[in-house]
Amino acid sequence: MMDKTHRVDEVTGHRRMRRLRKADWQRRMVQENYLTVDDLIWPIFVVPGTNILEPITAMPGVNRMSVDKAVEAAKRAADLGIPALATFPNVEMELRDQTGSEVLKSNNLLNQVTTAIKKAVPNIGVITDVALDPFTSHGHDGILRDGEIVNDETVDQLVRAAVAQADAGSDIIAPSDMMDGRIGAIRRGLDAAGHQSVGIMSYATKFASCHYGPYREAISTSGLLKGDKKTYYIDPANGTQAVRDAALDVEEGADMLMVKPGLPYLDICWRLKESFGLPVFAYQVSGEYSQIKAAAANGWIDGERAMLETLMCFKRAGCDGILTYFAVEVAQMLAKRN
Ligand code: PBG
């Protein structure tokens, strides 16, 4: 028989990677990661009032919803199998002040929506953000005194806010403020109030990123924010420091870790997963969502494929789940495939 060995076989020593890619069935056999509905957490924006669905210009396809509409949305999400929601309130301007005192009210907008969702849709998890930014008149996550975001006073406020959120029915508290010591303080506060089973998903590594722009339109903080958040969020240049931030949160009792933003920080996702073995979540933030939507609207990329590819990449990077504004769209797509 004629020897058909090619010089490529000699070069590669007869190894050929393309054998594993030659057909759909073969590719499916060796696929390493899968995206399922269980990976999705859906962030939603809530406004006061009833029967309101208000489009957010900078986030095509995303609406602010009144509590009644949020409850309907939660039902749809639960029916699709989405495990949890993350809620963000667009608080009335006149209720915002220097210390974000509205955050402490047991019946504030955020706590109202939690109670309403847990009552109507008990089988979906509710994750509440405990930073002060939706409640402050200056748009910062902490209390502002003489031009400084004061750490310890903010932590005291956050602990009380977290207990109020848990009282309202929140299943998981997600501190997104990056104050020092807040995870341990919140854990103690929750336990002292009898909320031992309420979890903490720490926004452990939150970077001072440009990608939050559309979110700030969504909760009306963009016009308020003076200066930037660089004295508390992490510098995008720092990976090792981010791992240390996460390590402290792990020591203080975080149950789950989050990386935010998502796609530009996949190295951090991987490092956290490798370092701690805790569940790691990525937040594909508003700016990431809007970039995909905008390019797709212009016909410059295939939006659906960009959505699915980016979400899959989070899985490959070690994430256990993704907070994404695409959650419902993806869940519907996954449901059709099965
Ligand atoms: C602040 C907070 C931010 C987001 C959620 N909570 C960032 C910020 O405004 O600084 C961003 C979410 C997104 O961009 O999708 N506590």
Image (cartoon, grey):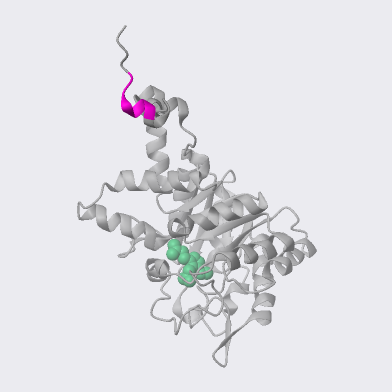
How many dots with numbers? Answer: 0
Question: Is residue 194 left or right of 49 when viewed as pictured?
Answer: right
Q: Is residue 6 above or below residue 125?
A: above
On whether residue 223 falls in the magenta region, the answer is no
Residue 51 image point, x, y percent: 39, 58
**Residue 103: where, in percent of width, then height?**
59, 73
Position of residue 243 in the picture relative to residue 28 (left or right):
right
Task: Tell me which secondary structure the magenta stretch mostly adopts.
Answer: helix
Q: Nearer the viewer, residue 217 or 32?
A: 32
Q: Which residues are magenta?
A: 5-10
From the viewer's side, name the closer residue of 41 and 203: 203
Residue at far bottom of view: 146
User: Going 41% across and 46% down the picture, which residue do you hit?
Assistant: 328
Residue 204 spot, x, y in % from top left? 60, 63
Nearest the viewer among 273 and 175 is 273
The reply to whether residue 264 is in sight is yes
Q: Residue at x 61, y 56 (%)?
A: 257
Vertical order, 140 against 81 (above or below): below
Which residue sits furthest top? Answer: 1
Quarter of the image for residue 219 reads bottom left
Image x and y of residue 26, in percent:
40, 23
Answer whether residue 17 is visible to the viewer in this image: no
Residue in view at x 56 percent, y 74 percent = 132
